[in-house]
Image (cartoon, rainbow, N blue to C red):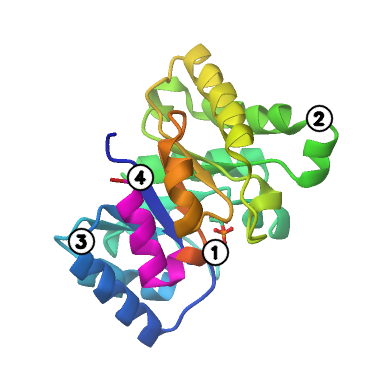
Amino acid sequence: MSQKLVVGNWKMFGSRAMAAELLQLLRDANLPSVVCPPYPYLLMAADLLAGSAVKVGAQDLEYRDEGAYTGEVSGPMLRDVGCSHVIVGHSERRALYGENDALVVEKVRAALRHGLTPVVCVGEHLEQRQRGLAKRVVLDQLNAVINGIGAESFARVLVAYEPVWAIGSGVAATLDDVAEMHVAMRAALRDANCDGVALLYGGSVKPDNAGQLLSLHAVDGVLVGGASLVADSFLRICSAAK
Ligand code: 13P
């Protein structure tokens, strides 16, 4: 099996001491992956991980490059501190901060403009799945970005399917559900002439289910939340991705 991608999203967890310890352990293990700590720890992460197989990403970005936007962090700043990746459109941003597809498109555009690889998150809510709308919701979110930036640019994007009901719940989507959604997304990508794009799965990925999820042909990697905060868990998931 070829190397699959593991991205860790720390969300709003950690401290300077915790970050330093975890990042050192990741650097020592040197397994290919991407870690996305909170903004204040990005510079430390990039410095500590420089020259290793572990890359650094942010969890969000502002789409404008600079200006009077109190509290925001831009693409050029993320590049400046050593980020190579940035998560865009995470369901927590969409649900808690009102991010819609139009804003996600602007952010993806900004990331690409500054040489950052966007990890674009898509996923349905439980109630949408129960009403049989899961595929339509996910494909609409995906197509909004493809149509917004064009197929050529979309080739530089990573996509993460994160069913909202599986995030932080401790219960990942079943292998069948993941495979079915990924096959549907792959077909949509093929229709749009951007077949090479990697499709990750996220939502309660743990060391004990990562192997099975990563063994699915349709899954090119995983986006890990809670388990990325514990070195042993994250490293076991990275090992499963080999
Ligand atoms: P958990 O792995 O904690 O379910 O979080 C998934 C996620 O939202 C990653 O972006």
**165 sits to left or right of 157:** right
The dot on residue 5 is: 4
In the picture of the structure, the residue carrying the numbered disc 2 is 132
Residue mark closest to the camera, 1 vs 4 = 4
Where is residue 147 shown, x and y percent of the image?
56, 23
Tell which circle, 2 or 4, labels the residue nearer the N-terminal end. Answer: 4
Dot 1 falls on a residue whose secondary structure is loop
On screen, residue 183 above or below 241: above
Give the alpha-carbon distance from disc 3 to disc 1, as whole Å: 37 Å
Dot 2 falls on a residue whose secondary structure is loop
| 70, 184: nearer the viewer | 184
Q: What residue type is labelled 1?
A: Tyr
Where is residue 141 shown, x and y percent of the image?
64, 33
Q: Is residue 84 visible?
A: no
The residue that appears at 18% across and 64% down in the rendered structure is 50
Q: Which amino acid does label 3 sit on?
A: Asn
The residue that appears at 36% across and 87% down in the rendered structure is 17
Tell which circle, 2 or 1, labels the residue nearer the N-terminal end. Answer: 1
Q: Residues within 10 Å of mark 2 (few under 14, many from 20)?
A: few
**185 sits to left or right of 85:** right
On screen, residue 101 above or below 52: above
The residue that appears at 29% across and 34% down in the rendered structure is 1
Q: Residues within 10 Å of mark 4 (few under 14, many from 20)?
A: many
Give the alpha-carbon distance from disc 4 to disc 3, as whole Å: 14 Å
In the picture of the structure, the residue carrying the numbered disc 1 is 69
Circles 4 and 3: CB distance less than 8 Å? Answer: no
Q: What stretch is highlighted in magenta?
A: 228-241
Circles 1 and 4: CB distance less than 8 Å? Answer: no
Circles 3 and 2: CB distance less than 8 Å? Answer: no
